[in-house]
Image: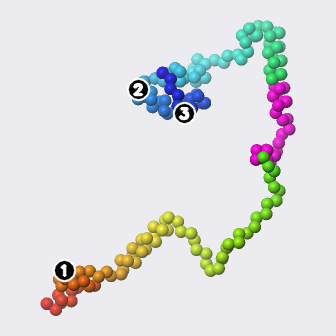
Amino acid sequence: MFASYSCMLFETHGIPCQHVIHVLTSSKMDELPSAYILKMFRNDCKKEPVFCPNAKHSLDAMQILRDGVFAIGDKISDTVSAKELSIIEEFEEFLGCPIPMQVDIHPPNDICSMGRIKRIKGHADKGQQKNKNKQKKKNVRQPRRCSTCKKVGLHDRRTCPEKANKE
């Protein structure tokens, strides 16, 4: 059983991704298939020679292999520039244009700094402002209907003026 996903974690790093592990656990598999265990992660891993097994017994074959490796190294050094670049030169080469030595920054024209400078209010301040408005509205008395005299006014059943007249 082998699965492949777009995250490509197993293909790039050799580690099974969470998607594969979820699929295997949902299919009631207790062990990871051997296809997901790379040789470098096993205990029986041993280093194998890079060269051909026939070349290690022959001195001439080893010399040919060594010369071939050095020839590849020479070709690579010819294609890659031997000059080491400074950090600034690397940035310029990456950007494709030179970095200016002097940059003129002009002050902005649209600043009116008369009076005090107000701080820009954030979301926390806006919440406090709503609470302040609610508190201000609480202090203002709203007219309501009295249950005793059935009139709309700034009194209620306890403070009704007609109740005081009846007693």
Query: Quarter holding the C terminus?
Result: bottom left
Measuring 35% from the left and 77% from the top, which residue is drawn there?
Answer: 138
Could you tell whether 14 is left or right of 59 in the image? left
Disc 3 target residue: 6
Q: Pointer 3: residues within 10 angstroms few (<14), some, or many (20+)?
A: few
> Which residue position is annotated with label 2?
27
* Residue 118 to residue 162: above or below: above
Q: Secondary structure at mark 2?
A: loop
Main SS of residues in magenta? helix
Residue at 55% x, 34% y: name it. 7
Whichever of labels 3 and 1 marks the residue nearer the N terminus, that label is: 3
> Callout 2: 10 Å neighbours few (<14), some, many (20+)?
few
Residue 156 at x, y = what percent?
23, 82
Residue at 84% across / 26% down in the picture?
Answer: 74
Q: CA distance from mark 3 to mark 1?
A: 72 Å
Please tell me whether residue 151 is drawn above or below residue 7 in the rendered image: below
Magenta highlight range: 73-95
Q: How is the image coloured?
A: rainbow
Q: Is residue 90 left or right of residue 156?
A: right
CA distance separating discs 2 and 3: 20 Å
| Residue on which the image places disc 1 | 147
Instruction: Give amino acid for label 3.
Output: Ser
Residue 156 visible in rendering: no
Residue situated in front as seen by the camera: 136 or 149: 149
Left or right of residue 55: residue 3: left
Residue 21, image x, y percentages: 47, 30
